Image (spheres, rainbow, N blue to C red):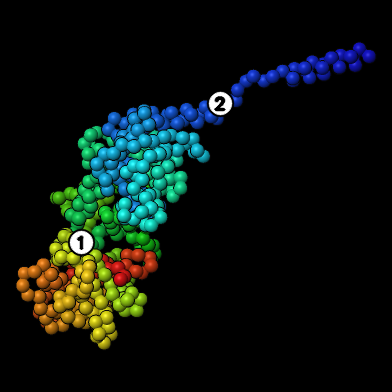
Amino acid sequence: MMKKHLLYILLFTVALGSCKKDTTEPIIGNVDERLSGTLAEYQTQLISAQFGWKGYLLTDNETPATFLFSFTDKNRTTMSADYSPAPAESSYRLKALQRPTLLFDSYSTLHLLADPTPSVLGGEVAGGYFSDFEFAFLSSSADTIKLEGTFNKSKLILVRSKSAAESAAIFTSVQNVSAVASKLRTYFKRTTIGGVECEVKLDGGAQIISFSYLDGANLKTVSSNFYVSGTTIALYNPLIIGTTTVTKLDGVGFDTASGFINASVSGTAIQIKEAIAPLKLDVTAAQRWYTQMSFNFNGCWVSDMAFHANGVDDFCNFRNVPSYSGLWYAGAAVFGGTGATEGIITFLTTNSFGSPYALSKVPFAVNAGIAKFTLNGSGGTFTGTTAVAQAMTAARSILYGGATAGSSQDWYLIPTSDDGKRYDMVRVSDAQAWISWRPR
């Protein structure tokens, strides 16, 4: 009986102890307090940059833009951009949405990229450039903050500027790297990364870098948008070449003594050199180029910049021609001809074709995947000192390699888009002249 009473007393004591209130807090703390603390840390980081933050934006339609931001503890920011360099002040907030978020909450220079009215900055109707003005934090280190747009998933990378000179140079950094690349006069440029020989193509306007290499017998091309910070080309998306992952090219510069561009990938030095032939030629491209023009693209190819030659864009100075709109290569049928392998190069103004300033019908032939253009007769008579006469005379000389009847020049046709709608035409003899074609 006594044992039974003792058992009841023990159970009562345990039950009473379990009813006591647990006053201990979870080790992780209060969620709201932690979020507030995180936001405060981000704001401290933003306002602590003495020389501001270099901002690199890539919109959802892959339009690049470069900014310089300065943040204050009064929720004010001053920003300038490569498309609007005058500093302008607006407001910002840090807020806990689904993730800690940086909101540019008043109309600013940044908002111009998202403006749905084309007349504002030339974007698409109702979409602009598909940019954002609210950005969630993805990661943060002492000198770099990575963010993502909450609506269009634009990428925004903030890099702490280390000096006033660095901040002042931000809007010329892409041009500076492009100028380094232009030191190599040839269209084709080669390097070796991780033992793999690659062709390198850097498009400073679109801010895209591409590497092409042989994967067995196939030519494989990988590309990424990039931004430039100082002498570093930083990729928005890592690229895999063989067993090497490329995230950036550091220390990009031209070595006058060697004639090479020096850089490094993951601490390993590389050299980028001139080449006069593609790593692998698409031997069907030249005929496809002509056939697509005749049957798919209203009988015409158009080039906005015309010929690049000897390191100079628009070498023939077509942009000096009043109202110049583009250079056309048109199938003979467009102008009433019947030749199956003929074409006419003419310039186009905003109002009309450039007649009588048109090259004569151009016999077109393909041999082993290489296009040949032969001068038929004089190729047009361009007399006088007018801008159009001089431009067409220069174009004739580049296309045919001479101004006398029978002069001919060989050209590679290099596809530059996956859909087969864009080609670069490159001079075979030295790869130092080329022209980019798009459909009409």
Tell me what residue is drawn at x 32 percent, y 67 percent: 422
Tell me what residue is drawn at x 34 percent, y 55 percent: 118
Residue where numbered disc 1 is placed: 186
Kind of residue at badge 2: Gly
Q: Quadrant of residue 70?
A: top left
Relative horizontal placement of residue 210, taking residue 148 as reference (left or right)? left
Q: Residue furthest left?
A: 384
> For numbered disc 1, what is the local secondary structure?
loop
Q: Quadrant of residue 416?
A: bottom left
Q: Nearer the viewer, residue 398 or 40?
A: 40
Task: Say which quadrant the N terminus sits in.
Answer: top right
Residue 103 rendering spot, x and y as whole percentages: 42, 39
Tell me what residue is drawn at x 24 percent, y 74 percent: 329
Give the CA separation, mark 2 to mark 1.
Answer: 62 Å
Residue where numbered disc 2 is placed: 29
Q: Earlier in the sequence, mark 2 or mark 1?
A: 2
Q: Nearer the viewer, residue 383 or 395?
A: 383
